[in-house]
Structure formats: structure tokens, C-alpha cells
Amino acid sequence: MSRSRREFLGLLGLGTAALLTGCVAAVSPPPPSLPAVPAPHPGPSRELRRGPVGDGRGIALTVDDGTCADCVAGYVDFARRSGVHLTFSPNGVLDGAWRPQARALAPLIAAGQVQMINHTWSHRQLTELPDGRIREELERNDAWVARLFGITTRPYCRPPFGAHDARVDAVAGSLGYTRSVQWSGSYGDSAEVTPEILMDRARTFLQPGVIMLGHANRPTVLGLLDEVLDLVRERRLEPVTLDEMFGTSRAAGA
Ligand SMILES: [Zn+2]
């Protein structure tokens, strides 16, 4: 047997062994490239409750917290298989639920399908904290998101419990959080909710322009995500990230 043929057969053998053990499939693509995290653009903060009024079909599905690791995993899996655009508002204190999903989220984040906004590090009510602690809550959480997911949360801050006032807004604005994100529809799943009530709220609130509030805290929603998606398709709604809804970008952070 010629040397080259022997080498070829050897390679073939290696290839077969690799296929059998799954090694070939384990070769992962290069990590997607992300824009550099931009410097903050301080400015006055304004409140957002819904998308711009017009004839668009955009809706922003936002998912907060992440106290239930399986729920975070379920939402990430849903995003991956459906292609639906989502905005997550995670707390760094719940790192244990988010970190295992960082790899699966990387291509979705790189593609702009998934966005991360700032819901603070430890989910305290910001109106009850002194300025320095508000600053710390926002900066620590953004640094965690940047480390784990490679992007900034600016310019979007969703204050826990929706609680904000002029002082909180001023501190947030000085750090580049010039958009305070509230909501115009909610699944009501920050508390225990039945599947019937959750779907009832979905049918009520999933209308063009809604900023929909959901939580990755209780598994009820996981069994309903496909039903929610059917509703979205039936109504010809277009799920978009907040960047897409308001024309901002994580590359600019504004
Ligand atoms: Zn929350």
C-alpha cells in the first residue's frame, strides 16, 4: 500500500472514531464578535411604557429576574428554537441561573435577537436607597452583564417593582440610563398565577406596541410559550428587542 493511501486510511479511521465518539460535532464555531462596550452617554432619563404609536406590529417581550434556573433555561431554549426576539432583565445576584446559559445565549446576543437590560444587581427598591447605593446597584449589574454576555445594558434600566422617582432617574441618567422601562402589559407572573389567567392576560395585552412584562421565576409560563407564540403569529405581531423598538443600539449604548 502506498504511503499516501495508508495515511488516508489512517485519517479515515480517525474520522470514523471521531464520528463514533461525537468528537467531530464537538468542534464549535469561533465565538461571535460583539461591538466593544461603549462609554456611558449621560442625559435626562425618560420613562417608556409602550412602543411608538404607529401602524407597526412590533411588541417587546421582556423577561425579568431569573429566580428559577429551569425557567431561564426554558426561555433561552424557546428563543433558540422559535427565533423570537426577547429582552432579558436579569439580576447579577442570580448568576447561578444565568451563567449556565451564557454559551447558548452568545449567538442570539451576537445576532441582535436577544438584548439584556439593567434590572439592578440585587433587586432592591431603588427609591429607598441613597444615591451611592443606586449607582452601585446599576454599575455592578452592568459590569456583570458585560463580563458574562459581552454587551452593555445601557441605555435601559428597568427599576425593580417599577419604582422610580426624580432622584432615581437623575442618578440613573448620570450613568447613561436614559430610558426607564415600565410596561403596558403583564402576564402577572411575578406572583403565582394559573395557566388560564396567564393566557387570558396574554390575549388581553399582546397588541401592537405593547411592552410585555414576564418573569423567569415560576415554571407556569414554560408550558405556555408555544401557545403565546401561536397568539403572536395569529395576530401578525412582530416581537422585537427594545433596541429595535426604540432605535437604540448596544454598540452606542444610547
Ligand atoms: Zn424584577
Image: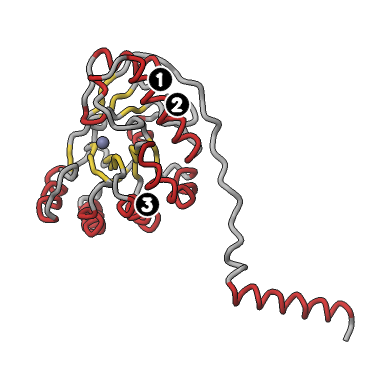
The quadrant the C terminus occupies is top left
Residue 161: percent from the left, percent from the top? 21, 31
Q: Residue furthest right?
A: 2
Of the residues shown, which amino acid type is indicated by label 2? Gly
The image shows residue 130, relative to residue 68, as above or below, that is above
Mark 3 and mark 2: Cα distance apart in space: 23 Å
Of the residues shown, which amino acid type is indicated by label 1? Gly
Mark 1 and mark 2: Cα distance apart in space: 8 Å
Q: Quadrant of ligand 1?
A: top left
Residue 194: percent from the left, percent from the top? 12, 53
> Is the C-beta separation of discs 3 and 2 under 8 Å?
no
Residue carrying label 3: 76
The earlier-in-sequence mark between 1 and 2 is 1
> Is the C-beta separation of discs 1 and 2 under 8 Å?
yes
On the image, which quarter does residue 136 sit in? top left
Residue carrying label 2: 253
The residue positioned 30% from the left and 15% from the top of the image is 130
Instruction: Report the side of 134 relative to 227 (left or right).
Output: right
Is disc 3 placed on a helix, strand or loop? helix
The earlier-in-sequence mark between 3 and 1 is 3
Of the residues shown, which amino acid type is indicated by label 3? Val
Is disc 1 placed on a helix, strand or loop? loop
The residue positioned 20% from the left and 55% from the top of the image is 220
Q: Residue furthest bottom?
A: 1
The residue positioned 31% from the left and 18% from the top of the image is 45
Mark 3 and mark 1: Cα distance apart in space: 28 Å
Q: Nearer the viewer, residue 9 or 130?
A: 130
The image shows residue 250, relative to residue 14, as above or below, that is above
Residue 141: percent from the left, percent from the top? 40, 31
Let me know if residue 176 appears in the view.
Answer: yes
